[in-house]
Amino acid sequence: MEKAFDFAQSEERAQDTWRNGGGFADGKTSAEDAASSYSIVMPPPNVTGVLHMGHLLNNTLQDILIRMAMQRGAAALWQCGTDHAGISMQSKVEKELLAKGLDPKKMPRETFLGHAERWRDSHGNIILAQLMRLGVCCDFKGKVHTLDVDYARTVLHGFVKLYRRGHIYRGRRMVHWCPQSKTALSDEEVLTREIDGFLWRVRYALADGSGRHIDVCTTRPETIGGDVAIAVNPNDPRHGDLVGCRCWRPFPREQIPIVADGSVDMTFGTGALKITPSHSAVDFEIGQRHGLPLREVMLEDGTMNALAGDELVGLDRAEARLKSVEVLRGMGCLISEEPHRSAVGIGERSGVPVEPRLSEQWFLRYPSVELAMRAVEGGHIRFFPDHWKKTYSHWLNNIHDWCISRQLLWGHRIPVWYRRGEDRTNVENLHVSVDGPGDEENWERDSDVLDTWFSSAFWPLGTLGWPDQKRMAEKGFSKFFPTDVLVTGPDIIFFWVARMVTMSLAFLGENVPEERIGEIVPFRDVCLSGIVRDERGRKMSKSLGNSPDPIGLIDRYGADSVRFGLIAASPLGQDILFDEKSLELGRNFCSKLWNACRFRSMQGPANALRNFDAIAAAAAGGADFFDRCILDDLAKGLGESRKLLKSDGDGSASRYDFQGSLHALVRFFRDDFCDFYVELCKWRLKKWPIRKNQTLAVSDLILRTMLQSLSPFVPFITQELWQQLQFGQPGEVLQRVPLPDLAFAIENLKASPAELERCCAFRSLLQQLRSTATGRTAAVLLLEKLPDSERLTDELSDPLIAMVGCKSLQPIDRIPLTLQTVVSPWGRLALAVGEAADGGKMREELAAVRRHIAANRAKLDDEEFLRRAPAHVVDGAQKLLAENLETEEQLASRLDAAGQFSTDSAIG
RNA sequence: GGGCGGCUAGCUCAGCCGGUUAGAGCGCCCGGUUUACAUCCGGUAGGUCGCAGGUUCGAAUCCUGUGCCGCCCACCA
């Protein structure tokens, strides 16, 4: 074997092996009928996107789960694909066209879509190719794009169904409008940000010629042209007499009424509110209540129209605000200007303030909301960490109808046709279907497309062929739905997770009784990973430049190290602070794994022993208690690892503790196997050749099992080593090799409780002796053989010496009292270090032990404790007390003797 | 204005349906290359578990209050 692990070469080789050997989770198994199935849908990345750290973490987690399922022999499907990403894709293409000197606004719909499709086809799969570098074994061949013909049919079908059930309707309502993208947005796509601005107090003169006036406070003077009234609270004594009067709008100068409305907050500003129904959702409602007209002063691109006043027309809304202040000041209507912080809606994609705008849109009244809540409350869908279900429920409890139409070109065009030249508001003139009206020439299709998130709400359904029975059968809908787990970020619980639940329940939930909700949810578990932040806790962003290039990291450290590092650094259910240093942990571990296997390969080939059971049999012959104990450790390590990362989909509580699960494997491998067992075996191999095969068989048993268990986490290096050590047939795909039944295989190798205790004692003995020996190479190990102790065999004395780190082992009749002794199976052991024992340190220890003794005695003297505490706790306290008393006695006598004996003379 | 999460060793975090003397990794410091690995091995030091009350024989863990830090939701113009 090579001296070091060459990840670049191994990655390529492993990919070949997986490609040729069915290494991807395409739902197929070698067995005719898999005993179980397991499925995950990958959150489809944006087709415009490039891989970022979040993808890396998220997909590593999914890959671990799916590989584990494959190892269990389950029919495992990991559906991947890409999302067409409506707004961001459209603006990207528009920008490219403008750069080429083409004006996207002036081209026909089809021309623009042609450009977009070409761009998508040439760049769209970059992100999946990048994911492949990470080693993910999703079903690349079965990838789905949300604009694929079949998937699009799913989406349109869903629309039509919901429309027919009365859940989708068209209406002229206030929506969030993005003047940059020139489309409506959903509530979720608008972020609220506190923005520092001003509050202007503006004077409106009464029209009765009395010289009286009413002042309003506003943050948006540019919309004054849209004012159609002033509203005051009917209970406000300051303005009560003005209700019913008319006043002058400053510009364009026109009389508007003063009305009374209970929703006006008397404590804010002057208690008078200017009513601009076309540009404020609240004002719109007030306007409706009072039968006020609408007066729109802004165009869809955010520039002011003629109604805004001669001074403002043509200006952008931001310029118009400044200008309007200037105009008001010139007119003497501006009473004051003070700094004011207010919450402003910002378009999630565009980053510009959105405008409330009245427009004709399609809305979805969410279906199955109640059921979606019950699905989670009843435990049919479980969140990890659990507390996210509160966020989910809170959102479902407070949702408004969803504006699903977008004034874009790129997306699923709404499957609605209007009879040409007829009144669109008349339902008679509407056609809603997936395939359109037969006589299309008489109809005109709705020009809007659907919100991208509307289409992704169908992801688990559509990728499995719903609602087409034939495609569902092909795709294995009955086998793979519901999916087992959804791994994603908590930031899209609203956007995606909750919406998928409502859709699945709505379409599959007809006539399903409550107890079977679990069969119609889109996924059983939702595992929310943290957000990857930089080492200082800041969100990674392009502008900060703190986001490393994932592919660059893979190039430099290797995919396994990146995966390992990310897992090792991500705490359970919290954001992860990414530091490149954590990748070094991964690299170091890979190196350790490589070297341990290299050491094994140096002892001779394992080629005769490809069969696990044969190895187990060879390991059993003549095994000593160290062999039995290391296998016991192995079983414990594996058990711990699996407990923390259960993914059987058997309904038992999983923890999705990836970090803990990996750590349990690493701990066993490094501490128990490499640093203890292998070190021990070095001498056994050297001094006792007759047991070589047996010893190597134990090693092989462990290495095989570890390679398999680690392979979901670090698939490349394990695949490479599996091949190099010839544990499997050439070309064998490691994730397809069934996990051995370890418990059964090592039945003959089970360590007895006594042996385990002895092994454990031996190791703690080593540790005690080492701490004394550290830094003292001249130390000599003393053995005081007791009458009933075992014989210390040659093959154990050498490793003992080596592992303690001393010079030699010397039998002695009586160990001096000054030395700390440990009891071993071969008698009492002590370390003579050639210098006087450290009395100061011993006195410290003695004081500590005495403190413990006092605390323990107090506890055991307390009758309440004895009466109320459970037996095992009392027993424990008693046992501890006894141990401490013994230690105290030993320490005391050593201290006592310290003055009388010198270690040098004892060795002589 | 509501809601959620965090506060444990220098750093990042476990432990939290109460029970022996609070753990890990990294870092620090000390010591080590005898045929896997210095990308390594061994060892030491380091914490009144944010704060204050309460419940209990017993609290990092449960309850109440409170302080910081972060996030999400919300139409005060």
Image (cartoon, rainbow, N blue to C red):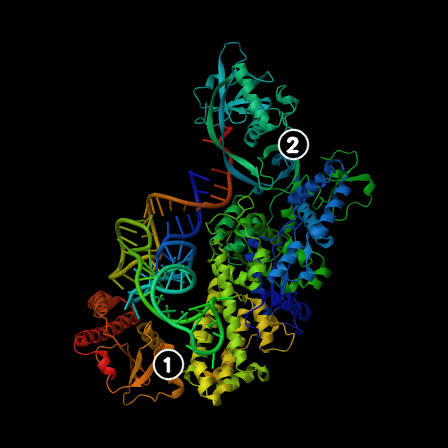
Residue linked to disc 1:
A800
Checking the image for residue A536, the label placed there is none
On the same chain: label 2 and label 1?
Answer: yes
Query: Up-down: is A288 above or below A868?
Result: above
Picture residue at 23% right of the left edge, 82% below the top: A906
Q: Mark 2 belongs to which subunit? A: A
Amino acid marked by disc 2? Asp
Residue A809 sits in quarter = bottom left
User: How far from the left and from the top, in percent, is residue A774?
Assistant: 33, 72
Report whether residue A654 is seen: no
Picture residue at 39% right of the left edge, 88% below the top: A794
Residue B56 sits in quarter = bottom left
Q: Mark 1 belongs to which subunit? A: A
Residue linked to disc 2:
A301
Q: Nearer the viewer, mark 2 or mark 1?
A: 1
Screen quadrant of the C terminus of chain A: bottom left
On screen, residue A424 versus residue A234, left or right, reads right
Which element is circle 2 on? loop
| Between A631 and A309, the one nearer to me in the picture | A631
User: How far from the left and from the top, in percent, is residue A732?
Assistant: 63, 74
Query: Up-down: is A138 above or below B4?
Result: below
Q: CA distance from mark 2 to mark 1?
A: 81 Å
Amino acid marked by disc 1? Leu
Q: Earlier in the sequence, mark 2 or mark 1?
A: 2
Which element is circle 1 on? helix
Pointer 2 local density, CA inside 10 Å: few below 14, some 14–19, many at least 20:
some
Give the number of callouts: 2
Query: Up-down: is A470 above or below A825?
Result: above
| Between A357 and A608, the one nearer to me in the picture | A608
